Structure formats: C-alpha cells, structure tokens
Image: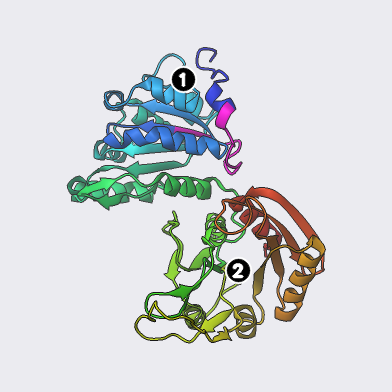
Amino acid sequence: MAKFKPSIHSSKLEITSSKSNLLEGRRIVIGLTGSVAVVETVHLTRLLMRNGAEVFAAMTKAAIELIHPNLIEWATGNPVITELTGQIEHVHLCGEHPDKADLLLIAPSTANTIGKIASGIDDTVVTTFATTAFGSGIPITIVPAMHSTMYENPIVIANIEKLKKTGITFIGPRKEEGKAKIATNDEILQTIIGILDKKKDYKGKRIVVTAGPTRAWIDDIRFITNPSSGRMGIEIALEAASRGAEVTLLLGPTSIIVPNKDINIISIETVDDLVSEINKMKKIDIFISAAAIGDYHVEKESGKIPSLKNELNLKLTPTPKILNMVRKKYSKIKIVGFKAETAISEKELISRAEKSMKKNNLDLVVANLVNKPQQGFGTVTNAVIIIKKDSSTEQIALTSKRLIARHILDRLVL
C-alpha cells in the first residue's frame, strides 16, 4: 500500500481540529459524483477537517469533468482516487482493513448514482466504494443534489426508500429555485457527528432546551431585549440530539439556523410565549434553561409612541420565574440553569450561582461572565464554571460552545 499512503500535507497541518475535535480520529471517504453541487465539496471537506476528521475523496469521471482532482487533493491533503488500481483503494478504505474509514459520504449524489447503488450496479469508483462499504458494515450517508423534477420521479423516490431500509442515511435535499439542492454544510456536519457519536446515553430521553433572547414590547414597533444569539442553547440541543435525545428547542428571535431537522423547534418571542409553551408540555426528562430570559415586562402601548416626546416613562414589572415554575410543575426532572453576570469576582459568581441552585432546586448551574473577550452573548466560544448540587465546581476554559455543551451533558447524564 506504499503508493496510496497519504503524505503529511500542509492542509492537514494547518486546519485539522482548528475549530473543534468533535470528529477527531475519524476517517471519512467523500464520494463525488457528476452534480454541479460538487463545487461545494471543497468547503465541506475543510469543515469536516476543521472539526477533526481526516478526509479521503473518490471521484467519478462525471465529477472530474466539473472539478479538477488537484483542487480536491489540496482540500483534503490526501491523494484523490479517480480510478481503482492494484492498490485496491476501495478495500483499503471501505473494506475489512485496519485503516478502513468510519463513514462513506456520497456528496453530492446524482439520481444516477442513487439508482445504481439501489440496483446493485457497480461501475464507477463511487459505486464500488458503496458496494464495499455495504459488505463491511461501514455507515453510508448520501446527500442528493439534482433538479427537483428528477427528485420527484417516483422511481428515484422508490430507490431512496429502498436504500433507507438498508440503513443508509439521506441528508436533504433543500428544494430551492426549482432544484433539489444539496443540504447545507452545517446540516451535513451535524448529521455526521450524530452518526459517528458513539455516545447514545440520552437515547429515549425527552429534553427541552430554551435558547435566545426574549422581547418585551413597548409599542407596536419597539421592544426591550438583550444581545443573546441563542448559540449556546442551540449547541446544547445539537449535542443532545446527536446523543440520541428527543429534543424540543424553545427558540427566541435569532438569525442562527439550526442544522438538524430532527430537533423540534418552537419559536417564541416573549416570556409569555415561553410560559405558554412550557404549560403545554406533558412529560419531559430534562429542562435546560440557556435562554436569556427578560426579567421585566413593560406595559405595551398600542400603535407607535410619538418620537417627539421630551420624556418617556416606562413601567416595568417582573416576569414569571421560569426555573421556579418548571420545578413546581416537574418535581422529579433534572433542571439546568445558567447564570450570566458582569464585572464581579469568580467567587461572587459561584456564590450567586449556588443561590440560584438552592432557590430553584436545580441539578446544575452553568455560570459565566459575559463582559470578557470571546465570552458570552453573540460569541462562538465561552468559558464557564459548572456548579453541581454538592457545591463542587468545574472550570471549563475558553473553548467552543459546542464543546461546552458536551461537558454539560457529560455531567448531567442519567
């Protein structure tokens, strides 16, 4: 196998695990077929690598006509497989071999390739990899991309259903502009994390996560809110879903798209909306309150308050305490609270978190200071202190919010 042995390419050295180690140690083969969506593969490959994966690519002749293998080799840092040789590359990566991959990802996949795999036809590099992966039990994921009229062809639909029954996972497509477009890279990443995550310790558990800000309307066009993006709660929801949980996300106004269609997303805007949705829920196992919930209502005026007033007085009244309400309704579930503060000492931060824990009978409190660089609202990273019921604490240094979500669920596991 000396000819096929990958070199240490600068692409690997520069970007592998630069974002997270969620896919660290994982080897993924991407099969590229003749869809114009193949141009997205470079970005997808780099995203997988930035989250820790090593990526190999296999290309059909039709894919090579659309994008040059040299670009894919640059992206992956590994030699690209455009034909099968005496090195039996398909066996090396997708057969019973010590160096075999953890996943075969066919992205993008044409209707032609789907039909061939469903019919057992093996006449391209990619279909040979699929045949071999079937035989060795390596998970296969297919990301379709084609014109929508092709995707709606009953034969294509039947082929997809046939392959789903064999255990193949399909991601997407997105139907836009008359085309069945390839799923977003973030959606593909989250699905792969879920497939390869060996931890399924939350399987069958019902988890409710709150995320994002709430709004207190002053009049018909103005409101009081905060700068929460909702990212922390979204990352918790994604992590819980990847570990097998049935997740409901109560999500305040945000521009962040949640790249997992298995998560039940309920949009909320005000604290009253949040209360209403919680009251509708019948049975849950865990409640994680990561939302930045407003502490005060304001008496809303109808229409628009004139902008020429010299003075405007607002009457603010306290909003319901969500954690206390949830604990009264669900006395036996596990509840996680968040405590965000500014400009106080670490000792005082822990003290306030402990008071919240005792007052609301919480199982964990995640505390942080939002006034430090790269921490708090609107950031992709954070540094937190996890406080447990026994008053023990754990410091999580600055890292991605997804890895913080993983730490929280590791400490909470039932």
Circle 2 sits on which residue? 288
Which of these two is toward me, 377 or 391?
Answer: 377
Q: Residue at x 19, y 51 (%)?
A: 154
Residue under label 1: 79
Tell me, yes or no, if residue 280 can be seen here: yes
Instruction: Left or right? Give the position of 300 relative to 156.
Output: right
Q: What residue type is labelled 2?
A: Ile
Quarter of image, res 72: top left
* Residue at point 76%, 54% (across, down): 395
**Label 2–label 1 contact, CB within 8 A:** no
Q: How many labels does the image show?
A: 2
Vertical arrangement, residue 362 with respect to residue 152, above or below:
below
- Give the residues in magenta: 14-29
Q: Nearer the viewer, residue 320 or 104?
A: 320
Q: Position of residue 64 (x, y in %)?
A: 31, 23
Q: Position of residue 20 (x, y in %)?
A: 59, 42
Figure check: 393 above or below 330:
above
Q: Is residue 131 at all visible to an observer of this figure?
A: no
